[in-house]
Image (cartoon, grey):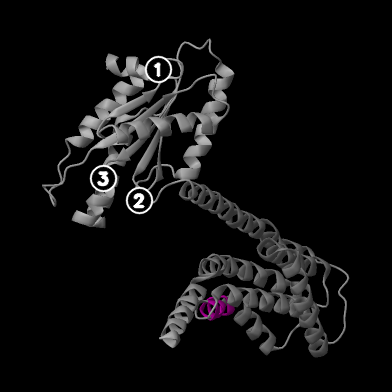
Amino acid sequence: MAGVRFSGGALALTQRNAGKGLSLARRLYKSRILGLALGFICVAAGMYPLHPAPWVWGFMLFNAFVWPHLAFQWARHAAVPFRGEHRNLLVDAFLGGFWVAAMHFNPLPTTTTLSMMAMNNIALGGVRFFLAGCVAQGLGTALGLSLFGAGFVARTSPSQLYACLPMLILYPLVLGLICYRQAIALARHKRELLALSRTDSLTGLLNHGAWKDQLEIEFQRCRRQGEGAPQGGAIALIDIDHFKAINDTYGHVAGDIVLRQLSKLLRQNLRISDQAGRYGGDEFCVILPDVPLEHAAELMEALRRRFGGLGYEQNPALQVSLSIGLAAYAAEHSDALDWLNDADQALYEAKTTGRNKISCRPGGRSPKALLNSL
């Protein structure tokens, strides 16, 4: 059995590696097609006055118009496409160094070729990959020198200058667009991950930590507002009565449906400014900014009644109810947890005095007097 578990883990790891970097290979496929096509014009203009052999022209055409497609397939079928694409970029750098030596270091075509590849490498792999690309270019240059001999063309002709302009103008624009789109995608993923880290996966409400962060913000706002504010704020802790019995009797799937139904009701009945979260298990929590306790109690009472009146098609006999503890902000609260503790005590009172009810901690007024006013 241990061997089976190991094999399954190895398979999962292989599948994750297979997908890594495939999007990078797809992005670079298009940019490589354009870059090498523009590079062909630049290198061909530098090579033409040197009257190269036919095989050199053939290899030049292969590099410009066949290699991009081979490189993509090579990376796509690699065990880790990300590493395969890095290998392709090093091959690009190697061939760039080769053509620099073949052109006998003609100033403008040489500068254009090396600078465009350096920009590509540093944009996609940072300084370390840029240095690796420089090594690959050096090896390609050494091969070119061994095949074509040492030479130096000191002057760039006007035709060679014009041949280099498309590469100097278009390729940086394309690379910049790729980098911009990547930055936008990363920013979107960061926002999505942040939202996921603050959201309860079952209910879609704030999770425990995110809700407590919002409670601290609301507590500090109430403290700045002071006692002279026309309205206070309240928080509610909500518990589904006998939730364990629901799970034991009807199953955990039914329990999850009940949790989602409550979260749906909270979203439908609260204001945009209210903050609802899942505190843990079958407990939910709500922040009600600038709401007097009397009004908060009315809102929670309406929620309790709606939730108690829900029907469940798969389990018609299922009956649900809520116990709710409410606490108003008070200047006597030393911190947000002190305020939360008041709501917790109110919830405890609701649960120990019959359940399916609301208990309030008004902060300075008699809870009994407030409940009698409901």
Residue type for callout 2? Leu
Instruction: Check disc 3 and report its element: helix, strand or loop.
Output: loop
Where does residue 48 sit, x and y in percent of width and height?
A: 73, 77
Residue type for callout 1? Pro
* Residue assigned mark 1: 292
Instruction: Check disc 1 and report its element: helix, strand or loop.
Output: loop
Q: Residue at 27% of width from left, 36% of height from top? A: 322
**Label 3–label 1 contact, CB within 8 A:** no
> Where 155 falls versus 346 (above or below)?
below
Q: Quadrant of the C terminus?
A: top left
**Label 1–label 2 contact, CB within 8 A:** no
* Residue assigned mark 2: 202
Magenta residues span: 66-75
Label 2 to label 3, Cα distance in Å? Answer: 19 Å
**Mark 2: few/some/many CA within 10 Å (<14, 14-19, 20+):** few
Left or right side of 67 for 49:
right
Left or right side of 155 for 71:
left
> Where 166 falls versus 313 (above or below)?
below
Question: Is residue 224 on the magenta stretch?
Answer: no
Where does residue 68 sit, x and y in percent of width and height?
A: 57, 75
Left or right side of 82 for 319:
left
Instruction: Check disc 2 and report its element: helix, strand or loop.
Output: loop
* Residue assigned mark 3: 242
Q: Foreground residue, 172 or 207? A: 207
Q: Foreground residue, 17 or 178? A: 17
Name the mark nearer the viewer: 2 or 3.
3
**Label 2–label 3 contact, CB within 8 A:** no
